[in-house]
Image: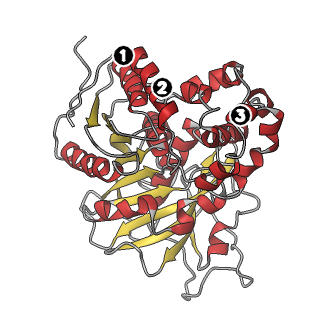
Amino acid sequence: MTSRTRLRPLLVLLVAALLLAASCSDDSSGGATGEAGGAGASTTAAAEEDGSSSEAADGTSPEVSLDAPVEVETDDALYAVPDPIPAGDHGTLLKYQEISPSPVEGATTYRVMYLSESLEGEPIVVTGVTVVPDAAAPADGRTTLTIAHGTSGIADECAPSKEAEGGELLLAGLAVSRGWIMTLTDYEGMGTPGRHPYLVGESEGRSTIDAALAAGALPDAEQGSALAIAGYSQGGHGALFAGEIAPEWAPDLDVIGTFAGAPATELDVIMKAAGGVVGFGMMIVAGYEAAYPEADPSVFLTDEGVSRLDVVDEGCTGEIFSAVSDVPGSELVRAGGADEEPWASLGLENNPGQVRTEAPILIIHSDEDDVVPVGLSAALFARMCGLDQVVERRVLAGGGSHTGAAPAAYAQAMDWFDGLIEGTEPVTTCPAA
């Protein structure tokens, strides 16, 4: 979760509760080819033989084909959703638009649209940004870094690809300097129709993995099978779920490891505290309603809260917080609503770390985090240790605020990925049984 709103008093109480619950201490050291586009998929994008644009004359999206992606020139064409959405393999790249000049030196940057799948099994389209290095690829193909982004809001205007200059895209240089592809999903429902299923783990995970699959079909991608998964805040939540589903969702990709920085976790606890963090609460309720037909907002929110739920559809995180700041949270969130079904079960279901992964995990969290309490990742770490997960948790002593700690966390994560590629044995900081 990323917000300029100061939430320290409530979060300190959450930390205390979670630390009491945590039973495991931490180390404070500071789709298969033919099933989805991607590894093994065609790396040659379709273009008109005469060199002309394949974009329709009226500037709207051309017809898309599952046989080869289509290059478009305008934003309107890129974001226009095919009607009907083709029922193809998740991770298939449908369209791409080169961003010129590239905001990333030494690389070509694209906006992309690709196929994914909703939790109900329906084909959907997802957008994002992908950066392909200009340098020659190694003989075994490029490693791909797929990033799940932190909270920016729910509305389409908050999608990272709409800006394509700031946010996690600033990390692209770390990947390009290594010769890696970097891809950044917008997530389901951001940049495309429908509400984004905010903090719905499997939705985030599918979008994140499918972005990596789609990247392999871009011009000169020359993608190998190695995949690094990363995310911070909401992105840490999404990255962990991506790592959990990757072996079945994209078996041709070889996950090196998963980095989760200050991950949003213990959703059941956060939901119980929604009255004190109403902006996040409204996004969670709206997102869960979008993903789960049984998730009735009126069970969680008061009548006044339900009447204001549409605030998530306009403006980004700061605007959402401002829109609900004029009344106490108790007037918007029902007391005990998070304990009612299906909300209680959905909160627990969307906690990461309930599945052991073969690939190692790195968690990094600042002890001064002012948005996501460090105790949340302590509880996550304890759960992972109980599964015998290979997981290293680093607490950055005096590491700074939530956003302030992100650059150092990502720098450490990239070094960690380098070590794994070079054959360094991953360590676990779980205490001995």
Rendered image coloring scheme: secondary structure
Query: Label 1 neighbourhood size at 10 Å, few (<14), some (14-19), many (20+)?
Result: some
* In front: label 3 or label 2: 2
Q: CA distance from mark 3 to mark 1?
A: 29 Å
Element assignment for label 1: helix
Element assignment for label 3: loop
Q: Is residue 396 left or right of residue 107?
A: left
* In front: label 1 or label 2: 2
The residue at which mark 3 appears reads as 292
Q: Quadrant of residue 172?
A: bottom left
Element assignment for label 2: helix
| Residue at position x 40%, y 27% in the image | 375
Q: Answer with mark 3 or mark 2, whichever residue precedes in sequence.
A: 2
Residue type at numbered disc 1? Gly
| Residue at position x 70%, y 46% in the image | 324
Residue type at numbered disc 3? Tyr
The residue at which mark 1 appears reads as 386
The residue at which mark 2 appears reads as 13
Q: CA distance from mark 3 to mark 2?
A: 30 Å
| Residue at position x 59%, y 52% in the image | 317
| Contact (Cβ within 8 Å) of mark 3 with mark 1 | no
